[in-house]
Structure formats: structure tokens, C-alpha cells
Amino acid sequence: MILCILKKRTNVSSFRYGISYFDIKRISRLHSSSNAEGGRISSAVADKKLVSRTMNREKEMEVLETNSVKGTRDFYPEDLRLRSWLFDNWREVSKSFGFSEYDCPVLENEALYTRKSGEEVTSQLYCFEDKGGRRLSLRPEMTPSLARMVMSKKGGLTLPIKWYSIPQCWRYERMTRGRRREHYQWNMDIWGVPEVTAETELLAAMVSFFKKVGLSSEDVGIKINSRLVIAEVLTELGIPEEKFAATCVLIDKLEKVPLQAIQADLEQLGLSSSIVEKLTRTLSEKSVESLSSVLSPDSKAITQLNQIFQLCHAYGISDWVLFDASIVRGLAYYTGIVFEAFDRKGQLRAIAGGGRYDNLLQSFGAESIPAVGFGFGDAVIVELLKDRKLLPTFTNSGIDIVVYALDRDLYNVAIQTTALLRSTGQSVDLILQLNKKPKWVFKNADKKQAKYVLIVAPDEYQRGEVSIKNLINGEQTNIEIDSLLTWSQENNNNNER
């Protein structure tokens, strides 16, 4: 009976404040308990306290978290202008080298990234099971997706292909300067070319970008090595080929941890202390000539390295590249030449990296196609350009003209004028507020770094004119409305020169 009464009494509050059936049962028990102990508390008091607590909880829940998820970024207009500038430079370089842009979904099957164990990326996946029971992942890199796309065409693509993309990638990793859990990455890949001419074309594209944004070979270098170096040493020491990739993944960690930290893992692969010693000694070589004395006279690795440095000389980028036997890259699918762009001052992590991955399709059960590519993240390069004071400012909104009706009766004329100017390709901001004073309009236009303010005013309009003020030199002139189209076209052409 008490429960029924409480249900009726709390019907409105339970609907409004989210009090559940179980909350009502609790009130009922409180009421019964209190009566049994001498009526110390009434059901009304219990009801009031519960409603108060529930309201407080809901009030707390209504406070929206304003920070973006850890490791991700919001792009306000100024930030997005910076990103667009960077992407535009990447696109211009890619197109100048004859590459075509592609894209694919950010969601992929998890198995696309977990076929190779031991890679750091497998422990950094943003993965989950969807409502259909499928295991999915946000892409941590683009190369496996590209491989899937090539496979899906079943040989229908005309080789060689030269493709580029600027995907958003996700990795759950420790964040440092220039390293986030979400980032964008410039990818350039060449499929169908087995010679190192493909690698050198990519290196030249990378250098072309560095030059384009004002960096020199004193700022950035590119270390080059070949995975075949390790492969040849291990073959000489009797280590089977299937252990090469796993060994390279472990060796790549030596940049971050001491040898002792991975000693047990190396020994588990069958690499004794003497083998590890021979490997580390080989990886300390700093010239192709000195490496030649370690490897066999007919070394394919030495031949490849000599070829690529000769081609770099032909491209005119010799001062950007150097040999470093310790560069092996941390992805298991690399098979030959690998390279890594770095900050000469040593203040930032790797700027970009890549290499040859001829057997990637084979690992997915398809016929191999020779392939090489690189990934170039957006975060480190921005930090480097900031350090070198080469990053442009992005406060300019890109607005050419601000149009303002001095009298609200002339607002329709301002709309028509705006439409006319926009038809010629001008970026035009129409003042939408009808009660703003000229002082506010000019201050607002100056803040947006607009080039002109066009004012539709009663006296000028009566004469068939509008007033235009040049915010760059301060000159103000009147232009006939009938001549406005010509003025806009000429002004737009001048801006494009």
C-alpha cells in the first residue's frame, strides 16, 4: 500500500529527475525501517533527499567536457588554415612529381594490422567490436589499406602506379613533442618498379617539399640503409630467412632502449650473444665503403646502396642524404632500402620515414608486387618550422572584401552587390547585423585582414555609386555600381598574379 502511494506521489518527479523503480523501493524500505524504529524519518523526507541527490547528479552530468579527447586536436579556423597550407604544399609537390591522390575509409578490419606480431603498432591500435561482431580498427597507417585496394583490383591496375594520400591516422601511444595519438600523414607510394629508381624519386619529392617550405640540408638530413644488410649478415651466420623481419623490428628498438632490454627477445629468436655482437658491430658502420669490408664482395645490399647514392647525386640532393646502417625502421614488411628524415639539431623525433616493401601482398595471400613508399607526419614538421621561424602566420582570414549597408533600407542592395562580387571569384563577407556602426565594421574588417570595405550608403547610392576603402593603403574611392563588375574582375586578376 505504501509503495502504491509513493508511486503516485513521485510520478512527476521520477519522470523529471530520473528516479527509477528501485529508488522508489529504497524509499519504501527507508519508510518501513523508520516506522519500526520509532518514526525517526518520514517517507516525505526520504523522498526529498533522494530527489535532491538525483538532481545534483544530473546537474553534474550536464556539465559538458570542453577539452578534446587526450591526444587529439580541435582545429579552429586559424589552425585549419595552417593545416590547409601544409596539405596544399604536400599536394603541389605530389602533383609536380606526377602522383595521383587516393583515399579510403578510416575504419579497417583489425586483421589488416595484426598479421605481423612483434610490431609496436599492434599494441597501439584503436580497435573495437562493432554491433555485427566484426573486429575493426581505426587505421594506424595507410600502407596496408593501399595494399588492400591494390589487391581488390585483382591485377586490373596499370603498373607502375604513383599514388599519394593525406590520411588521418590513429595510434594509442605515449605522447611527446611532435607525437600525438591522432595525426595526419602525407603518403607517397610507387608500385610496380623493382629498381631503386623508385626510392630516389620519393627521396627527391621529400627534399622538394623541404626546400619549398624554406628548409635546407643544414636543417634536415635523410638517413639511408638497406634491410638486406641485416639479412646478409644473418644468412652468413646461419639464421633462417623467416627470422629477418622479427629481428629488424627488435633492432629498430635500440634507438629507444639499451641492448640489454631486448637481449632476451633476440635470444628467443635464436640469436646468440656472438651473433648480436656481429649485428651491432655492422650497424655501427657509417659509410658504404666501410660496410663493404664487412659484407661479401657480391653483396646485393652494397650494390643497392651505391646505386641510390649515385642517383641522389644526379637529382642534386647528395647534401641531404647520408648512409646510416642503424636505420632499419620498425615495420616488419620492409624488405630493402629504408630511409628516415631527421632534424640535424637532434631536438625532434623522426620527421618522416619509409622504404621498400615488395612482399606485403604476399603476406596477405596474393602475388607480390614491388612497392616502395613513405609516411610524413604533420606534427613534427610543424614543430620544426616553428623552431626555424619558417612557419607563416595564419591570422589572415582570406577575405577580400567586406560589404556593409550603412542604412538598413539598403540591405537588399548590399546583398545584390555581394552576389555580384562573389560571382567574379572574390571572397566576400557580408555584414549580417543591421545595427552595426561604421567604426565596428572597419575594426572587424581590419581584424580579419580584409583588403577592402565596400559601403552602400544613401548619398552615394542616389548617385548610382558605392564607396570602397582600400585597407592596405587607406585610400577611399567611389565607383559606379555599373562598373563594379569590371572593377572586381580586374582586382581579382591582380590578386592572382
Image (cartoon, rainbow, N blue to C red):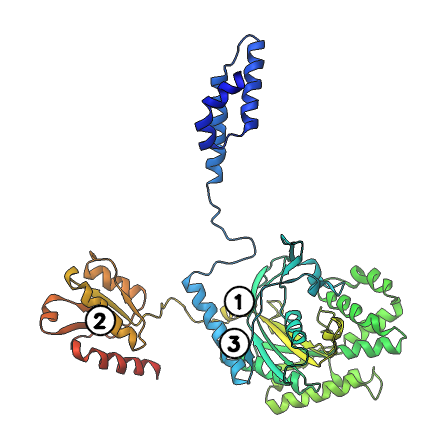
Quarter location, residue 483: bottom left
Task: Report the Cα–Cα distance between label 1 and label 2.
Answer: 43 Å
Q: Which mark is residue 90?
A: 3
Mark 3 or mark 2, which has the lower sequence index?
3
Residue 453 in view in this figure = no
**Residue at (52% x, 68% y) in the render:** 382
Choose between 289 and 434: the one closer to the eye: 434
The amino acid sitting under disc 1 is: Glu
User: Residue 40 at what x, y percent from top left?
Assistant: 53, 11
Could you tell me if the residues under marks 1 and 2 are in contact, i.e. CB atoms within 8 Å? no
Q: Residue furthest right?
A: 238
> Relative to residue 225, is residue 255 depicted above or below?
above
Question: Label 3: few (<14), some or many (≥20) within 10 Å?
Answer: many
Residue topped by disc 2:
417
Instruction: Identify residue type, mark 2.
Output: Thr
Separation of residues labelled 1 and 3 (CA atoms)? 16 Å
Residues at marks 3 and 2 touching, judged by CB atoms closer than 8 Å = no
Is any atom of residue 209 visible in this view?
yes
